[in-house]
Image (cartoon, helix red, strand yellow):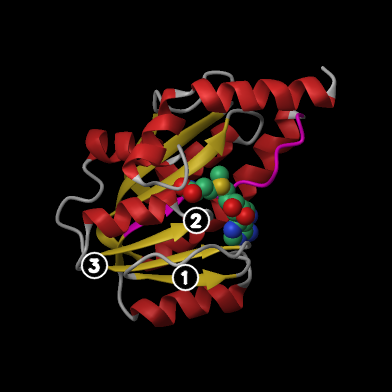
Amino acid sequence: MKKNKISKNWIYRQKTDIYVRKSKIEGYRSRAVYKLKELDEKFQLTKNISSAIDLGAAPGSWSQYLSRKIPKGKILSIDLLEFQKIEKVHILKGDFTDIKNQNEIADFFKSKVDLIVSDMAVNTTGNKNLDSIVTGELCQEAMNFAINHLGKKGFFVSKLFMGSSFNEIVANGKNYFKELKVFKPSSSRKESKESFIICKNIK
Ligand SMILES: C[S@@+](CC[C@H](N)C(=O)[O-])C[C@H]1O[C@@H](n2cnc3c(N)ncnc32)[C@H](O)[C@@H]1O
């Protein structure tokens, strides 16, 4: 498909997408918020929690959601990109895979965290296998961090693309967590290869 046609299709889809319209009405920066909302409603991620980390947070709709759900909680968000402030959220600009940033996150909390969510993804190339591998590496990095910094009963939730690295990451998750589920929210576009892993209770 030509580039022009793709962007026309994108504009049309944005205009008619129910989640785009809903996010505007509800004051969220992105339709992506409805994926986290659905995950939360299904798995009770934010029930009785007081701390959360949002990895790959820009433009910030997941962080907005978390700050509304746990207004008295301690929340930190990180992204490569700069994004607008969110009340009660500590924002870090940088690469999560950089150990300096991971140490800064750990220093900020000083104790184990209740919830770690990752929507990190690089710009997709169209090559499904490559996209799966790159996003899989980010997910694995986030999982390694979660294993060390999540409380025993904490949740780790991450975006993952179907493809060659999917099974390996799910298998790794099962080694470290007592429970692991895979779920694709209905607000995730059907044509997208994304899914989410929900990991609970570190072994
Ligand atoms: C799909 S967007 C996140 C949308 C966000 N959940 C929201 O609700 O607004 C994915 C984000 O991951 C970020 N990202 C990708 N690699 C990253 C890395 N190594 N460290 C931090 N952020 C990263 C990208 O900059 C991008 O903003």
Task: Examine the rendered structure and indicate whether residue 175 appears above or below residue 96.
Answer: above
**Amino acid found under the numbered disc labelled 1:** Ile
Point out the tag, 2 or 3, that comes first from the N-terminus. Answer: 2
Q: Which residues are magenta?
A: 115-126
**Amino acid found under the numbered disc labelled 2:** Ala
Percent position (x, y) of residue 98? 63, 70
Percent position (x, y) of residue 182? 41, 31
Is residue 98 in sight in this rendering? yes
Percent position (x, y) of residue 15? 53, 25
Residue at 46%, 48% (x, y): give it.
Answer: 29
Q: Which mark is residue 73?
A: 3
Tell me: is circle 2 under 8 Å from ligand 1: yes
**Amino acid found under the numbered disc labelled 3:** Gly
Q: Are marks 2 and 1 in contact (CB under 8 Å)?
A: yes
Between marks 2 and 1, how big is the CA–CA gap?
A: 9 Å
Point out the tag, 1 or 3, that comes first from the N-terminus. Answer: 3
Percent position (x, y) of residue 83? 54, 62
Point out the tag, 2 or 1, that comes first from the N-terminus. Answer: 2
The residue that label 1 is drawn on is 91
